[in-house]
Image (tube, rainbow, N blue to C red):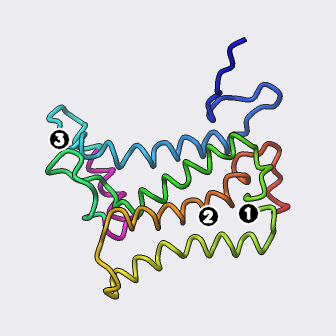
Amino acid sequence: MVKTVSSPFELKSNSQRPWRSLGADVILVALVAGPIAAPFLASVTLPLLPQIAEIIYFMGNHVCPQSEMGLPLAPPYLMAICMRCFGTLLGLVVMRYLYHLNEGKAPYWLHRYGIVGLLLCLGFCLVYPFELYAQYWGWWRYSNGVVTLFGLVSGLGLGAYIMPLLHRPNLDLRKI
C-alpha cells in the first residue's frame, strides 16, 4: 500500500474545517506569495499586472520597516518586504505545517500554557524589533542572513501561539 502525505490545506474527513482556518490559510498564502510576485508583476508590460504590483508594494511599504532592503528578484525591482519580514512569514508557514502534523498536541504550542504561553509568545515576537533597533544603534550592519533568522524566530513564536487558535475545530472564542 502506498502512503501519501496530505496537504495542510486539505479538509479532514472526520470533521469539517472551520472557516477561520481556511481564511487564515488563504491570507498566509497571499502574504507569502505577494512580496515574491511583486517584482515580477512590476517588470511585465502586460496591462493590470504592474498595477497589482503597485498595490503589493504599497502594502509592503506600510508594514515593513525596511522595505527598501528587499531582495532584487527581478532587477531593478525589489521584493516588496525585507528579509526580516519574510523570515517572520516563513516562521508562520513552518508552524502552520507543524500544526498540520500534530494538530496542536505537541508541547511547544504556547496557547496550552495560558498567560505564561502568551508571555513567551510576546518574548519571541520582541526578537524582531530588538534586532531592528540593534541595527539602528549600530551594533551590526544589515545582513539578510541575520535579519531572516531574527524574523524566523519571531514568526515561530507567533505561530506557536496562534496556529492552534486559528485551526483547531470547534473553537469557542468566548473562552479565550
Q: Which residues are magenta?
A: 53-66
> Pointer 1: what residue?
110
Instruction: Find the distance from the CA under tag 2 to the CA under tag 1.
Output: 8 Å
Query: Residue 52: within the magenta?
Result: no
Which quadrant is the C terminus positioned in? bottom right
Element at badge 3?
Answer: helix
**Amino acid type, mark 3:** Ser
Q: Do callouts 1 and 3 mark residues in contact (Cβ within 8 Å)?
A: no
Residue shown at the point (40%, 82%) measured from the top left: 133
Of mark 2 and mark 1, the one earlier in the sequence is 1
Of all residues shown, which one is farthest toward the bottom?
A: 137
In the image shown, does 98 or 59 lie closer to the viewer?
A: 98
- Three-letter code for the amino acid on which mark 2 is drawn: Gly
State the image coordinates of residue 19 (x, y, percent, origin top left): 68, 40
Residue 124 pos. (x, y %): 59, 71
Q: Which residue is mark 2?
A: 157
Residue drawn at x 24%, y 47% as measured from the top left:
73
Residue drawn where x is 85% and y is 61% of the image: 175
Question: Which one is earlier in the sequence, the residue at label 1 or at label 3?
Answer: 3
Front one among 66 and 87: 87
Give the label, 1 or 3, closer to the camera.
1
Work out how far the residue at label 3 is from the one at label 2, CA to CA, in angstroms.
35 Å
**Of marks 3 and 2, which one's residue comes earlier in the chain?**
3
Q: How many marks?
A: 3
Q: CB under 8 Å between callouts 2 and 1?
A: yes
**Do residues under tags 3 and 2 come within 8 Å of each other at their CB atoms?**
no
